[in-house]
Image: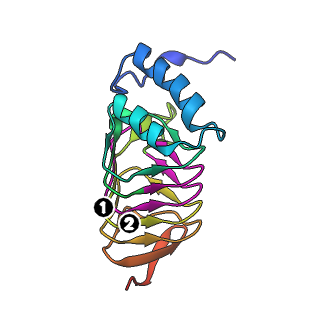
Amino acid sequence: MQVDLSKYDNSWFNPGQGIIVRTIWHFTNTIFFTNGLFPFSGFKVFLLKIFGAQIGRGVVVKPRVNVKYPWNLSIGENTWIGEGVWIDNLAKVSIGANCCLSQGVLLLCGNHNYRRETFDLMVGEIILEDGVWIGANSIVPGNSVCQTHSVLSLQSVAPVKMEPYMIYRGNPAVSVKKRV
C-alpha cells in the first residue's frame, strides 16, 4: 500500500529562524542544555539570550533542560527552570517573574489533530504569569494561561485557564483550593 504524502502539508508552520540557525541551536542545546554534565546556569542563560530569548535577572536553568526554539521564549526575573524540563515552544512561551517549573515539567505548544486523516499540526502559545508554580512531571499544553500565582500540583495536566491564586490537581486538573 502506497501512502500519498502530498496531503500531509504543514508548510504553513514557520519556526521563526532558518535552517542554519536552527541547526546551530540544535547542537548548542544538545551540548549545553540536555546534557546533564553541564551545570552552569549563567552560561545557559547567556546562550539563550544569544539565540533571541528574553531572560530576566536571577533566572536559574538546571541540567537536562530542553528548549526547542529560544527565540520563542521569554522568562521573567528570579524564575527557576528545574532539571529535565522540556519547553517544546513551537509557539511563544512566556514565563513570568518568580515562577518555578519543577523537575520534568513539559510545556508543549504543539499537538496534532487526530480527527483529521492528515493529522494536521496545531500550535498554541503558553503564558505563565508571575508567581506560577508548575509541579514536577506536570504538563501544560498549548493555548494555556496560568494566571498569577496559580499552582499546578505534581503530575497534573493544566486546563486551558488556571485562575489566579488557585491550586490545581489531576488530569485534567481542577481547582482544589485557594493558594494562601
Point 63% across, 36% down: residue: 35
Can you identify the residue that label 2 sits on? Answer: 132
Residue 151 position (above or below residue 97): below
To which quarter of the image does residue 77 belong?
A: bottom left
How far across and down, in percent of the image, does residue 64 sit? 60, 43
Point 43% across, 77% down: residue: 167
Residue 148 position (above or below residue 123): below
Q: CA distance from mark 2 to mark 1?
A: 6 Å
* Residue 149 visible to the viewer: yes
Mark 2 belongs to which amino acid?
Answer: Val
Q: Nearer the viewer, residue 123 or 118?
A: 123
Q: Nearer the viewer, residue 36 or 17?
A: 36
How far across and down, in percent of the image, does residue 71 sit? 34, 33
Q: Check if residue 153 falls in the magenta segment.
A: no
Can you identify the residue that label 1 sits on? Answer: 129
Magenta residues span: 80-108
Residue farthest along the right direction in this orientation? 1
How far across and down, in percent of the image, does residue 134 sit? 47, 64
